[in-house]
Amino acid sequence: MSKATSKQRKPSKKLAEMRAEYDLASMDGGVRGKYYQAYRAGHTVKIQREDGTTVVQHFELKDGVVLLEPDVREYFPDSASVNAALRCLIPLMSKKRKTKVKA
């Protein structure tokens, strides 16, 4: 999803309290979606326990899984609500229209 451009905002209280040497205007910005493909491929989480043991868990998004953005998740918190909304849209779509899948 693209972010809407907005007017210059006032610095937050936390930002106003930052030291002068942290000049955020001169810093390079982050790259949106930099780790997207790697995340979709799967990732491993290592949890260090207090007793010194390590638990390793591997997470992978299965075929057919759709990752919702946080703002969309506020309106559609579960699969049933997403499916109901999409079923309402299906009749409105042209039957000849084919969607391209982003890789």
Image (tube, grey):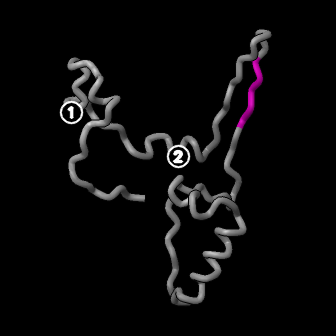
Q: Are marks 1 and 2 in contact (CB under 8 Å)?
A: no
Residue 76, quarter of picture: bottom right
32 falls in the magenta region: no
Residue 91, quarter of picture: bottom right
Would you place residue 81 above or below residue 62 in this image?
A: below
Residue at 35%, 55% in the rendered image: 3
The image's mark for residue 25 is 1
Residue at 22%, 18% in the rendered image: 21
* Horizontal side, residue 5 vs residue 33: left or right: left
Give the crowd class for mark 1: few <14, some 14-19, many >=20 residues within 10 Å.
few
> What is the distance, in whole Å, between disc 1 and disc 2 at their CAs?
29 Å
Residue at 49%, 71% in the rendered image: 100
57 falls in the magenta region: yes
Query: What's under tag 1, amino acid-wise?
Result: Ala
The residue under label 2 is: 37
Which numbered disc flags the more N-terminal residue, 1 or 2? Answer: 1
Tell me the SS state at disc 1. helix
Give the crowd class for mark 2: few <14, some 14-19, many >=20 residues within 10 Å.
few
Residue 32, quarter of picture: top left
Quadrant containing the N terminus in the rendered view? bottom left
Span colored in magenta: 54-58
